[in-house]
Image: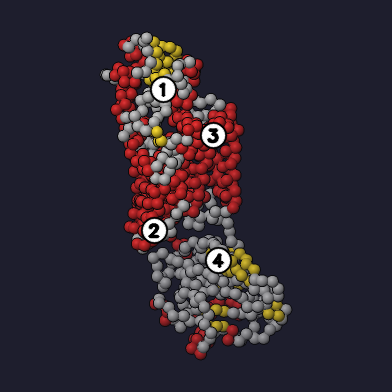
């Protein structure tokens, strides 16, 4: 087949390294002449018919490595380093074409003005049209397909690139070959064959020099099969959901339940504290939405149903992490970041409304990262901020994420002033929405009320290296910083500032480590992906089904095991229920700080002197209570100020011995962990 082998050889002489023309210009004397001169210089006789029945589509591109073609294992074509030619052979039967000779006019060229240095070449682009014949009848001309040129980073058009450093060829829906068989039916799209670029020593050592192998499009391979990788996100969420399926054991869960019951009875969102005689600040139910849910679930399903809300919250966090990380990372990277993020949040995964804050912080960060890329405001953040403000006191972090992102967008200069102002309207509108909650504009000042007593609460202390959650966050942050430090690509200011915000939150308090992990997770996913092959898997329907199905399976497993495990709480003085219930209504009880919320929920007949709602107590009262528990000098003044007649304290607390030895209090009853004392009559 001399003609078939020589034709592409002619292309190797005719085509310089230039870009492909998108439109074909009709032949003219000025354009025909160079083609005829090139064909004459090639030394090939183009007047004869082809020896094989071919239908050829030749899009001309501008990559740089030297390549060659082996089509169907039958035809070898040599192509120089400056041109990548994609050849599709639809039919090669070996039959001699019985049509008329092919004149030179069947080869057309279309010049185009170029801005590059190679624009002065005599031939700008070349389209070879070979009418194939089958049984003496024309099958129809081929249709040129759209193919993107390979790009070399930091190289010019004329500079050659080694085959080992050839850029990866990405697959998309553009990699579809369209055939036009006029014998019937519309053109059909077929998967385009994948071409492997390589030199004479790349791949198979027995391969012929300059061979470009045409193979079927392979599935992306990795350490694990694709089906297994698609199940990784759902598997991570499944494990997290099952691990948190435990009885109610958070001391603050109980007063949240009591708050929901109180709200359902009175529908009062603001007013005097109904439970403690020592509270001095008005009590605002700014977390009323999840409290109503918890109260309703308790009424319908009891404590096991309430305990099931924790796996549900973990599932919401996991799905949000998956949704935020997958557009930026592969399946492996997304699953890895989600796993480490769960570890970073592990100390805060308790049955409280702050679970919603963690999920929403992930969603808000991902939304602002998208806005930083396309300049579009996400107005849905405004109503979601209203829901957040009705759910937890950390709602203002959503506004803070937006403000930090806006500063980064301004430094990146990715949008104009007018569009930036539109983006800035989102956090402003979110603040306005937060002021329209049932608690009113006073909600805007609630973060400052808690800040006055944080120095006395353990979870508001700085984090420690002995805490697994803090170590998990450090792993995420260290990975991001180290990858950025070694990267040759500039990092967007938006991502830098968001990571700075996350690190600041994690270093501030032990309680905000989880919030910092939520903010850094979407950025970490994209950063980790930079260490992996760039051709990440697209989100498929199978992945979605597996992720949602495994998450639902975890929730079902939790629902099956919790009725037996969570019928009774693991927190509180449950073995002292009888004597506590026998106390007269309105009895003032000096209590351990951790058991105050349980007393509000389990024994409404008593009035605890302190509980987890520290914002309703004066800072001085909180300090006096700490001194009382430690039996510090002046602890007797706490008894005088509270007028308590009973005390429920931990059996190992120093004040128990001080009360019995110095104040003549008597032990009414002892429990496994607590002791009930009575004041002298």
Q: Which residue is mark 1?
A: 607
Of badges 2 and 1, nearer the viewer stands 1
Rendered view: 301 above or below 75: above
Label 2: how many Cα within 10 Å (few below 14, some 14–19, many 20+):
few
Secondary structure at badge 1 equals strand
Within-10-Å neighbours for mark 3: few <14, some 14–19, many 20+: some
Q: Which residue is mark 4?
A: 174
CA gap, disc 3 to disc 4? 53 Å
- The residue at which mark 2 appears reads as 422
First of labels 2, 3 by sequence position: 3
- Residue identified by numbered label 3: 296
Above or below for 42 versus 245: below
Between discs 1 and 4, the one toward the N terminus? 4
Q: Residue at x 37, y 55 (%)?
A: 424
Q: Are marks 2 and 1 in contact (CB under 8 Å)?
A: no
Given this view, does label 1 or label 4 mark the residue nearer the observer? 1
Of helix, strand and loop, which one carries label 2? helix
CA–CA distance in space, label 2 to label 3? 40 Å
Q: Which corner quadrant of the image does residue 585 belong to?
A: top left
Is any atom of residue 320 visible in this view? Answer: yes
């Amino acid at each position: 087949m001399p003609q078939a082998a020589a034709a592409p050889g002619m292309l190797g002489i005719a085509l310089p390294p230039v870009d492909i023309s998108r439109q074909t210009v009709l032949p003219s004397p000025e354009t025909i002449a160079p083609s005829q001169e090139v064909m004459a210089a090639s030394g090939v006789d183009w007047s004869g018919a082809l020896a094989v029945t071919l239908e050829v589509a030749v899009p001309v591109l501008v990559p740089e490595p030297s390549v060659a073609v082996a089509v169907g294992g039958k035809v070898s074509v040599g192509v120089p380093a400056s041109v990548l030619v994609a050849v599709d052979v639809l039919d090669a039967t070996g039959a001699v074409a019985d049509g008329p000779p092919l004149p030179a006019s069947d080869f057309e060229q279309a010049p185009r003005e170029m801005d590059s240095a190679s624009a002065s070449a005599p031939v700008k682009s070349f389209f070879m049209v070979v009418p194939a014949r089958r049984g003496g009848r024309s099958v129809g001309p081929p249709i040129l397909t759209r193919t993107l040129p390979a790009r070399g980073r930091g190289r010019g058009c004329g500079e050659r690139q080694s085959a080992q450093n050839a850029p990866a060829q990405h697959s998309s829906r553009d990699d579809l070959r369209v055939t036009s068989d006029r014998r019937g039916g519309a053109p059909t799209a077929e998967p385009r064959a994948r071409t492997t670029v390589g030199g004479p020593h790349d791949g198979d050592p027995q391969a012929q020099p300059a061979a470009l192998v045409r193979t079927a499009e392979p599935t992306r391979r990795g350490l694990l099969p694709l089906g297994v990788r698609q199940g990784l996100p759902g598997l991570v969420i499944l494990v997290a959901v099952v691990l948190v399926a435990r009885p109610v054991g958070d001391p603050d869960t109980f007063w949240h339940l009591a708050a929901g019951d109180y709200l359902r009875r009175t529908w009062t969102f603001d007013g005097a504290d109904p439970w403690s005689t020592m509270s001095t600040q008005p009590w605002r139910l700014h977390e009323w939405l999840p409290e109503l849910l918890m109260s309703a679930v308790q009424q319908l399903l009891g404590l096991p149903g309430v305990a099931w809300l924790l796996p549900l919250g973990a599932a919401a966090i996991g799905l949000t992490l998956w949704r935020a990380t997958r557009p930026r990372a592969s399946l492996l990277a997304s699953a890895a970041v989600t796993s480490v993020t769960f570890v970073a949040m592990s100390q805060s995964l308790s049955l409280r409304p702050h679970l919603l804050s963690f999920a929403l912080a992930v969603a808000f960060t991902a939304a602002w990262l998208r806005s930083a890329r396309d300049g579009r405001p996400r107005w849905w953040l405004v109503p979601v901020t209203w829901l957040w403000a009705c759910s937890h006191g950390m709602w203002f972090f959503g506004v803070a994420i937006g403000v930090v992102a806006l500063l980064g967008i301004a430094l990146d200069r990715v949008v104009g002033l007018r569009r930036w102002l539109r983006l800035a309207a989102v956090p402003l509108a979110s603040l306005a929405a937060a002021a329209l909650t049932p608690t009113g504009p006073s909600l805007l000042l609630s973060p400052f009320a808690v800040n006055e007593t944080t120095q006395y609460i353990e979870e508001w202390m700085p984090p420690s290296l002995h805490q697994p959650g803090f170590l998990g966050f450090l792993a995420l942050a260290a990975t991001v910083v180290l990858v950025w430090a070694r990267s040759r690509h500039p990092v967007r200011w938006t991502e830098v500032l968001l990571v700075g915000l996350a690190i600041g939150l994690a270093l501030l308090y032990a309680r905000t480590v989880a919030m910092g992990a939520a903010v850094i997770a979407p950025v970490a996913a994209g950063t980790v992906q930079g260490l992996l092959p760039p051709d990440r898997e697209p989100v498929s329907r199978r992945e979605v089904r597996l992720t949602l199905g495994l998450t639902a399976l975890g929730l079902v497993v939790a629902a099956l095991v919790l009725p037996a495990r969570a019928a009774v709480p693991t927190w509180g003085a449950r073995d002292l229920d009888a004597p506590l219930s026998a106390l007269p209504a309105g009895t003032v009880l000096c209590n351990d700080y951790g058991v105050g919320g349980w007393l509000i929920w389990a024994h409404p007949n008593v009035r605890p002197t302190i509980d987890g709602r520290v914002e309703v107590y004066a800072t001085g009262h909180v300090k006096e209570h700490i001194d009382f528990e430690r039996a510090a000098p002046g602890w007797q003044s706490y008894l005088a100020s509270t007028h308590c007649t009973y005390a429920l304290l931990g059996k190992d607390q120093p004040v128990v011995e001080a009360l019995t030895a110095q104040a003549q209090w008597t032990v009414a009853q002892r429990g496994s962990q607590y002791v009930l004392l009575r004041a002298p009559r």
